[in-house]
Image: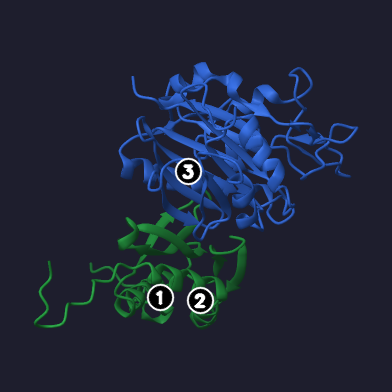
Chain colours: A blue, B green
Amino acid sequence: MEGQSVSNDTKFMFWNICKQPVGSLVAAASRQYNLDLILLAECEDSEAIRLELNQSTERPFIHRREAGCIDVFSRFPLGSLAILGDYGRTSFFHLQHPIGKDVLLAALHLPSKLHMQNQDQTLNCTRLIEKVKYFETKLGHKRTVVVGDFNINPFEHGLIAAECFHASLSRRVAQRETRVVQGNEYTFFYNPMWAHFGDREAGPPGTYFHNASSSTNIYWNMFDQVLIRPDLLDRFEDKSVQIITMIDETDLANQEGRPIKSDHFPIVFALNLMEG
Amino acid sequence: MAVKNLWGELPKGEEAGRSPKAILQEQAMLLSNSAKDLLGKVTTTRNEYGQIEHELIIVAPFLNNYEVGIVRASHGAMTYPVSVSDMTGSDLKIAECPTEQVFETVLEKVFTSKNVRLIISSLRSQALKPPPAPPTGVRVE
């Protein structure tokens, strides 16, 4: 049932593919999950992926990338996905659903801990949130999604601090919309990825495995995340978020459950952007 | 009793040379003037660590004001040293410039880099050009 949307949901996938030739897997994922928008980091051959994606579909994908580092493949009509700006490793898009609500979509691949100290990662997040606010003001709404490889975990300052992404692990808290800290008002994000940490969920304990020699080592990291603004929460269900470890018959994990096709697992999620 | 001036003649600011912001603004203006289809702009913010950050951004008006960040310069209360990040690549700090001259050298390196050349040429190639005027005497239906 390829390409036939069985719901009103707009389905997204983000995957840091680590420069691997995974076009056939991306194409298989697009069929399996009825994806509408695919965002790839570290994609070296976007044309090969576009060809794989469009091999047998009635709804072809259009490739978008200007000066940013995220390759986007969209099934929306040409003109429905405008690139607003590229700033280093973050790109901002205006997704205008043909018959639904428009959203601000920020896609990113932030510098890794190998190249940036923790406090610089935090500082980087304060810059990004200023850009988010800039485009929210420009578009006149806060229906915003931020997705990508943050290279920091959901519990780190860059994601939780009010001056940064201010991303709460609780939908109920995020639904308060804003919080005043020392006289300044900060809007929340909701970060559904917290619920996927560890062994309780059926999926893997994180999206990225790293065995460090330092005394503090959590092994599994949740670097790949999606953050949702409160104004979109009634269009988003937690259960739509999945960390993908299997595409068709292909296992993306080795026997220890760690990612093998890339060093990250993909994540998928959905938003119901339809009007009414 | 008149207060005795212990400050002497106060420096006017010229001794400190041109600030990184002034240099970036000059370059943004230069870009706007030489490439009529592109605009250069400089944004300034103060980050959470009290550093002042300036970003030089290219705006393409014919692409719905699409923006692309080129370079970020950060400094404290003292304008130098200023650290520079290349926003078109890794977005990591590429240089710490102790003086205005070094800052200009680093900027030149970024502005003439392959990445920036590619960005400018591909943006300019998309600029809407008016269709050529029909030859005189030809009736246009």
Say which residue appears at 30% left-offset and 67% top-offset: B128
Residue A211, located in which quarter of the rendered image?
A: top right
Crowding at label 2, few (<14), some or many (≥20) Cα neighbours within 10 Å?
many
Q: Is residue A212 left or right of residue B20?
A: right
Query: Can you tell which mark lies on residue A129?
Result: 3
Say which residue appears at 72% left-offset and 26% top-offset: A197
| Residue A160 visible at all | no
Report in which chain the residue with disc 2 lies: B
Q: Which residue is mark 2?
A: B107
Q: State the residue in front, B23 or A244.
A: A244
Same subunit, tags 2 and 1? yes
- The amino acid on which the numbered mark 1 sits, given as a three-letter code, is Ile
Q: Mark 2 and mark 1: span between their CA atoms? A: 10 Å
Q: Which residue is mark 1?
A: B23
Q: Mark 1 and mark 3: span between their CA atoms? A: 26 Å
Q: Is residue B137 above or below residue A209?
A: below
Report in which chain the residue with disc 1 lies: B
Position of residue B131 measured from the top left corner of the image (x, y, whole percent): 24, 72
Position of residue B83 measured from the top left corner of the image (x, y, whole percent): 56, 67
- Disc on the earlier residue, 2 or 1: 1
Q: Are marks 2 and 1 in contact (CB under 8 Å)?
A: yes
The total of numbered circles placed on residues is: 3
Q: Secondary structure at mark 3?
A: helix
